[in-house]
Amino acid sequence: MVQIISDRSELKHSLRKLVTLVQKNGGWLDERLIIRYERGGFSVHSKTNGANSNWIIKLPPACLLPTDQFQLSLAGDDIRVESHTSEFSGGRLDLLEIMLELWNQTGKIAAQKKTAFWGISESDPDLFRRLAAGRNTQFYAKLEDSLYSKDQHERLLIKGFLMTRTSGLASNISSSERTQMLMPIIELLNHHPLAPPYTYLFSQNEKNQLAIKKFCALPQTTECFVRYGYYDAYDLLLNYGYIESNTFFIRSIPMEISLPGLGTMKVYTSTGQMGHKNLPPQIADLGVFLPQFFINRDAGVADVGYLLIPQDTAPHALRRVLGFIIYQLDPKLPAIKISEFVEMAEKQVLAENTRFYRDLLEHLHHLDSARKSRHALQVQSAMEMANVQLSKLAKYPFIGKDSPTVTRTLS
């Protein structure tokens, strides 16, 4: 039987009800799990020190809650169901109601307003824009556009809150469409960059279940983690409100890379990876480092979803990605010329990212005392994050090293 640990009786009751509803809807939970609420946060633990590869949670579609089938609203700092579609009823609605009960009991909306960077978008829009300047996601653009519309601002705050608790999941193995789903119990697990991701089991016996494997960060610890996605310290701070230094890359800020005589790379900060089917063997192992990109040879432009600046776990990844994109801009380039363009692009990426974080530190350092005091948590966290990023940039494997060498094996 799943164990519940909390010093608050109403939370223990709500968590037990959530576990019961998940199991009633066909979900499977390892009986050795422990769900805790301590010091303002949820966590999921295992009673055993067994192998990390074991399944601990499996949720069928009946336990997953598509966010496009219901609308939420705020009553002060409480969140409630405003409306839902006719098909979103019964067990799913019961699950949503108990999840909202848990969020309200633990003050999640109030906490997000205090810690999340999008929470200050209304009270200090200029500071918000500066803190979010290194990301050009659609959500932040919409949030900025809504600063003077209270109703729209509230809805986007709810959307931002849900973004930290959902995952884009396909309804079947052949579908390319993703629906944002709330994941009861699973959303209580904390993030670790080395943990396995959410796994969809599509076999006939598993019936499209969303599953989580056991992962404890250290052998003698009990807390189980999941990887929310591929995030760097900046992503995690913006979206989840905390700093994580144990990441193996930096996501570049949005920028344009000028390659005279060849063209321009326009770098964004999306999270869409290149599909890994039918990739040339020379780049098939790049994994998350290989972004989606689109080439317009006539215009000499490469639109690049993102660039990741690696640490020593994958030292050549950035150079290989740059080389592959440059080759796609002009497949007739000799290898020596590709190497020159790679070096040129690499220097710009490192310089612009270093400049951005140094400028952010300088800007925050010179904020007037009233704004610093009013948003002390966000300001201090942003400064710590910028220092983490600068430290990682300084450790880039090829700082001050030889120019890159690219072989002619990119086709």
Image (tube, rainbow, N blue to C red):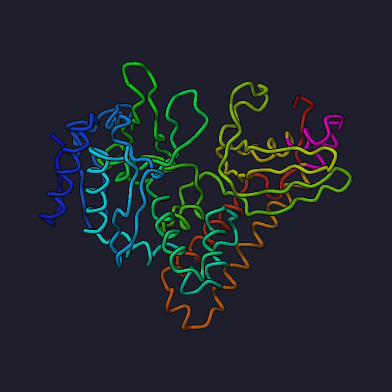
Up the image or down, 316 lies above or below 394; here it is above
Task: From the viewer's perspective, tell me whether residue 214 is left or right of residue 133.
Answer: left
Residue 332 found in image quarter: top right
Residue drawn 79% across the image and 26% down it: 408
Magenta segment's dominant SS is helix
In the picture as drawn, the residue positioned furthest to the right comes out as: 261
Task: From the viewer's perspective, tell me whether residue 100 is left or right of residue 136.
Answer: left
Q: Is residue 364 magenta?
A: no
Residue 167 found in image quarter: top left
Residue 264 location, x and y as percent? Answer: 79, 47
Residue 284 location, x and y as percent? Answer: 62, 26
Residue drawn 39% across the image and 57% down it: 158
Up the image or down, 389 lies above or below 287; here it is below
Residue 406 location, x and y as percent? Answer: 76, 33
Residue drawn 25% across the image and 58% down it: 104
- Give the number of marks: 0
> Which segment did they paint magenta?
325-341
In the picture as drawn, the residue positioned furthest to the front comes out as: 86
Task: From the viewer's perspective, tell me whether residue 261 is left or right of residue 130.
Answer: right
Quadrant position of the N terminus in the picture:
top left
Between residue 244 and residue 144, name the one nearer to us.
144
Residue drawn 29% across the image and 46% down it: 188
Quadrant position of the C terminus in the picture:
top right
